Amino acid sequence: MEYSIYGSCVTRDIFSELKLDSYVKQYQARCSLHSKVSEPFEDAEIPTLIGIDSNWQKKMVNYDLKKNGLNLSSDDVLIVDFIDERFNIMKSGTTLMTQSKEFNDLDLASKLNCTKAFSRGTDLEFDFWKIACQKFKNLLPSPHPTIIVHKGIFALQYIGKDGLIDLPNREFNLEMNRRLEIYYSIFIEVLNPNTVISAPKELIIAEPNHKWGLAPFHYIQEYYEELWGQLTSSNL
């Protein structure tokens, strides 16, 4: 079975950390659901993406601006997570964009004359989120692909030499987990996914030696093993 991923490294790393890359059909990251379902830019409106060297990062920004990057059919299995909802949302005209690090590195806010669309974590945003979930549902082919929600959240601790140590920015990490719980619950209510996977609390631990570095969403190896086990036993 192959999997398409719309989300972030927390899902992609299940496959990369366990050397299962051949199971990944498509992967789109750095794109908020708010942005994904808004109006796309035309090619002529998109400035030259100069400022970052990574072709993959440029591709993700381009997908975010053009609202493409996932070619789904009813036969696909789609895994979604919302860790990349940590970024602010920018607006230019009727188009929403994800203010990722790459977005900032490319100076797109000034190039596209953007303003902040709304404040994250507010009742207003959650109203918009429900609308975005419905639009996303309407964009899917009919019958819908198999949908798996990976309820990835921010770790609060990492492994140190003498045990667990609190990660920096604890208040932000807790706030993100509050938001993520609401994002997931609304998405599940609207999309009615085939299955939901999540790690037990004792495995939501950051790994300081992770290949991407220490971050609240770069987990210990056991996390990925647990999630792969849930995927393969989900009877899809």
Image (cartoon, rainbow, N blue to C red):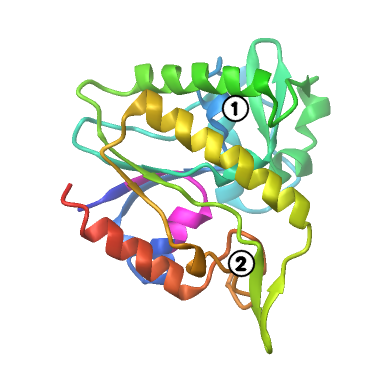
**What span is colored magenta in the figure?**
4-13
Q: Secondary structure at mark 2?
A: loop
* Residue under the point 57% across and 25% down: 34
Viewer can see residue 55: yes
* Residue under the point 68% across and 50% down: 174
Q: Nearer the viewer, residue 119 or 89?
A: 119
Q: Nearer the viewer, residue 36 or 10?
A: 10
* Residue under the point 46% across and 23% down: 133
- The picture places residue 224, in percent across and down from the top left corner, at 41, 66
Query: How many circles with numbers are drawn on the protein?
Result: 2
Inspect the image, locate mark 1, and give the three-letter code of the amino acid beneath it: Leu
Inspect the image, locate mark 2, and give the three-letter code of the amino acid beneath it: Trp
Q: Secondary structure at mark 1?
A: helix
* Residue under the point 73% across and 21% down: 118
Indicate whether residue 234 is drawn in magenta.
no
Against 71, residue 43 (above or below) is above
Indicate the quadrant where residue 179 lies.
top right
Left or right: 95, with 228 as reference point: right
Name the residue that disc number 1 marks.
65
Asked if disc 1 and disc 2 are in contact, CB closer than 8 Å, the reply is no
Label ID, residue 151 = none
Against 4, residue 131 (above or below) is above
Viewer can see residue 45: no
- The residue mark sitting in front, 1 or 2, is 2
- The picture places residue 148, in percent across and down from the top left corner, at 32, 43
Q: Earlier in the sequence, mark 1 or mark 2?
A: 1
Name the residue that disc number 2 marks.
212
